[in-house]
Image (tube, rainbow, N blue to C red):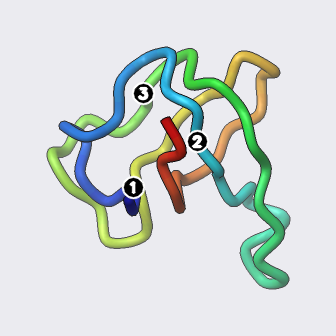
Amino acid sequence: MNGQKRSTITIGSKVQIVLKQDQRNGNLTEGIVKDILTNSATHPHGIKVRLESGAVGRVKEILA
């Protein structure tokens, strides 16, 4: 499932995000959502979240 709709992402979800510095090479970082930072209902590049590790990026895939 992709991460373009805010309604599909919940705190505690396991997701893969792309960090700002990895946008060109496409490296994904896996983690658990701590905060949802995007206020709009959708975003074409993915909803921005903060992981429990502190990493901030846009959701590319929802794992659980």
* Camera-nearest label, 1 or 3: 1
Task: Decide: few, some or many residues near mark 3? Use Cα within 10 Å; few <14, some 14-19, many ≥20.
Answer: some
Pinpoint residue 3: horizontal percent, then vertical percent: 39, 55
Pinpoint residue 58: horizontal percent, then vertical percent: 55, 53
Residue sitting nearer the eye, 27 or 50: 27
Tell me, yes or no, whether the two marked residues, 2 and 1, touch with CB atoms within 8 Å. Answer: yes
Q: Secondary structure at mark 3?
A: strand
- Look at 19% across and 37% down and name the residue there: 7
Tell me, yes or no, whether the two marked residues, 1 and 3, touch with CB atoms within 8 Å. Answer: no
Q: State the count of labels.
A: 3
**Label 2 sits on residue:** 15
- The residue type indicated by label 3 comes to Ile
- The mark that comes first in sequence, 1 or 3, is 1
Image height of 59 relative to 30, above or below: below
Q: Is residue 19 left or right of residue 50?
A: right
- Look at 20% across and 55% down and name the residue there: 42
Task: Report which quarter residue 21 is drawn in.
Answer: bottom right
Image height of 55 relative to 15, above or below: above
**Label 1 sits on residue:** 3
Q: CA distance from mark 3 to mark 2?
A: 12 Å
Q: CA distance from mark 2 to mark 1?
A: 9 Å
